[in-house]
Image (cartoon, rainbow, N blue to C red):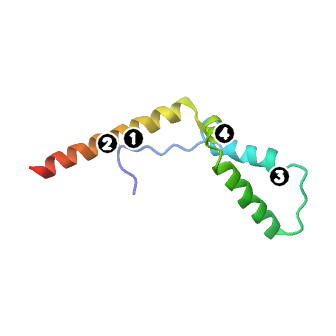
Amino acid sequence: MVFSIITIMHIPPYSPNLNPVENLWDELREKSFSNKLFKNMNDVECHLSNSLGVLENNCELIASITGFEWIVTAATFLFYSAIIFILVKLHFNKS
């Protein structure tokens, strides 16, 4: 279900400024998978899992790769909107 206030926008297949996960995949490909040869898919999966774990633990790198101003602004707006929603709900539930 899509709410009426949400508009679905289709983005081009490669648009790193609109889809920051593209930048994360580039980081993995360039830093973790360049010049590597694997014996089988299981080795690829293990290496990917380990590489994602390293990336997951480097919050500063993830923020620098994905923290576009429009994303930070939207996340901040959503955070404060959720807080206001919770406070209003708590206020009216007391009555």
**Helix, strand or loop status at disc 2:** helix
Q: Which residue is mark 4?
A: 61
Q: Position of residue 1 (x, y in %)?
A: 39, 57
Label disc, if present, on residue 79 of the rendered structure: 1
Label disc, if present, on residue 5 of the rendered structure: none
**Helix, strand or loop status at disc 1:** helix
Q: Residue furthest top?
A: 69
Find out whether the residues at labels 3 and 4 contact each other: C-beta distance under 8 Å: no
> Which numbered disc flags the more N-terminal residue, 4 or 1?
4
Label disc, if present, on residue 83 of the rendered structure: 2
> Which numbered disc flags the more N-terminal residue, 2 or 4?
4
Question: Does 38 appear above or below 27?
Answer: below
Q: Position of residue 85 (x, y in %)?
A: 27, 44
Looking at the rendered structure, the kind of residue marked 4 is Leu
> Which numbered disc flags the more N-terminal residue, 1 or 3?
3
Cα–Cα span, label 1 and label 3: 35 Å
Looking at the rendered structure, the kind of residue marked 2 is Ile
Find out whether the residues at labels 4 and 1 contact each other: C-beta distance under 8 Å: no
Find out whether the residues at labels 2 and 1 contact each other: C-beta distance under 8 Å: yes
Closest to the observer, 12 or 48: 48
**Mark 3: few, some, or many residues within 10 Å (few <14, many ≥20)?**
some
Q: Which residue is mark 3?
A: 33
Comparing labels 3 and 4, the label whose residue is closer to the camera? 4
77 on left or right of 64: left
